[in-house]
Image: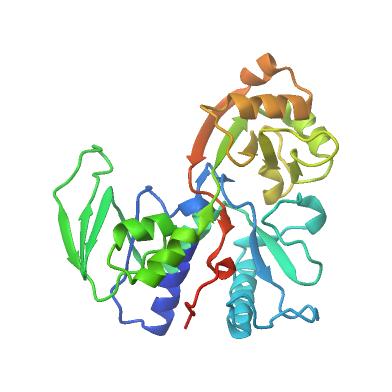
Amino acid sequence: AGLTGCLTAAMLRRSHPELDIELWERATYPSGRFGAGQHGADLGAQVLSVIEVDSGHPNAGADGHNLKGTDLCAAWEDVQLMVSQGWLRRAPEEQLADTEERMKYQGLWAHFWCLHGFSWLLQQLAASAELRLRRVERVKTTDLTVQLWATERRSGQLRDEVHSKADLVILAVPAPEVLRLAPELPAALRAALRQIRYDGRVAVALTLEHATYPAVRAAFAGAAEVSLDLGDTPHEDVHLVAWQNIKRGPVAHGDPMQLVVHSTCGAEWQGPTEALKAVSGFCGLPLAQLEGLVMSSKVIDWKICQMAQPLESIPTNLRLP
């Protein structure tokens, strides 16, 4: 029940309102890498990016990269609706850092923050489409039968096995999970899926006492993000530091500071220490002092994170419908 799963389910609801649709998710909330968060801070994606189809750019709204121009226009309309509802706010491009996965082409891509965090946005998508979210511990697929092992949220104990039957099962998961859950796929498709590659990264969310605000504000100097692995003296293990408060507007007196730190590809962090060291150096705060100002932290070690080799870059005879 990440962005792909929630959007797919919502689009099915639009075109077939009579369907009985369930979303299955291992977390207690719609998540995936896009929606992972803590207290409104985004641990995964920092922006939602779409093509600005009415910008006048020659490639805006054009077919390409296995995408149809009509779908790009529909995506832009959906995002504009979310802006009008107060769910999203456009992020000024000059406040965003340069990253390997972000397209900063003026007049082509537009980037948006979610004021309440992308996990909240996915919950709104699921609720507006009247989708049932079920938390599962394990999933096993056999033909059209899906077996779920659900976890009781209050006790944490494994409930009785639940059997469900479906006319259609959509796996909105990384390629390795598809191969594990659907071993009977055609050989050509399995061969293509095996070539899709991902990198691995660590994300750390830090909630700091308001006393850190002057140092944080001075370090970011009007920006929302900083890439520490770029420039004349790149950091070896830290890729991005993102200031979450700025997405929501002016910082009020007493507000805790929320920072998210992304590691470089392949970094191995056992906890928040490396992220704290990076913030200490970036903000000019002594590490011991900073550690005493930490209110909470959350660490996610994504073994499968950003796509390093997508399907469209793989030589294959497969064609999307």
From this view, report whether residue 199 is shown above or below residue 174.
above
Residue 145 in percent (x, y) is at: 19, 67
For residue 206, side relative to residue 146 (left or right): right
Asked whether, in this view, residue 151 is left or right of residue 109, the answer is: left
Q: Can the viewer see residue 66 in this picture?
A: yes
On the image, the x and y values in percent for residue 124 come to 47, 62
- Image height of 132 relative to 219, above or below: below
Q: As rendered, which of 127 and 45 lies closer to the eye?
A: 45
Of the pair 104 and 248, the residue shown nearer to us: 104
Name of the residue lying farthest toward the top: 288
The colour style of the image is rainbow
Q: Position of residue 314 (x, y in %)?
A: 55, 67
- Residue at 64% across / 79% down in the picture? 64
For the residue pair 319 and 261, the one nearer the viewer reads as: 319
Q: Residue at x 76, y 33 (%)?
A: 216
Task: Provide residue 57's location: percent of width, then percent of height.
Answer: 80, 78
Q: How many marks?
A: 0
Residue 168 sits in quarter: bottom left
Q: Looking at the image, which residue is at 66% across and 33% down? A: 237
The N terminus: image quadrant: bottom left
Determine the residue located farthest toward the left in the rendered image.
160
Q: Is residue 6 left or right of residue 87?
A: left
